[in-house]
Amino acid sequence: MKDSSRTQGGLICVAVAILGAWFLLGLLQKSYWALAIPVAAIVCFALGLTFWVGYTIATIQVEPPDDAEPPGTGDSSSPTRDSSR
């Protein structure tokens, strides 16, 4: 593993510890914003993710393969598989 990856991981850990302490300080001071900001961020993330899923489903273009045969119209001369085993 590269040293830069370890440095980035360490910086992320330090940032999370600072943000966690800041959050706890806000809770201890009974600040409305200490709960409102994280809850708003989670709600916005969930709404954005849900919108992205809906948009992806609504705009996907699926074309059936040209060589697909309808079910049940297969060649009867082809060997059948023994399903009793």
Image (cartoon, grey):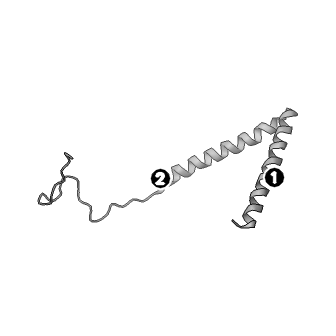
Picture coordinates of residue 31 (x, y %)? 84, 35
Residue at image position (15%, 58%) is 79
Q: How crowded is mark 1: few (under 14 residues within 10 Å), some or many (20 or more)?
A: few
Which of the two discs, 2 and 1, sits closer to the camera?
1
Residue at image position (18%, 57%) is 74
Task: Please indicate whether residue 76 sits to the left or right of residue 56 in the image.
Answer: left
Picture coordinates of residue 39 (x, y %)? 71, 39
Residue at image position (72%, 63%) is 5
Badge 1 element: helix
Picture coordinates of residue 62 (x, y %)? 39, 59
- The residue lying toward the viewer, choosing from 20 and 85, is 85
Task: Please indicate whether residue 16 sits to the left or right of residue 71 in the image.
Answer: right
Picture coordinates of residue 4 (x, y %)? 75, 66
Residue at image position (27%, 61%) is 68
Tell me how far mark 2 sits from mark 1, CA to CA: 41 Å
Residue at which label 1 appears: 14
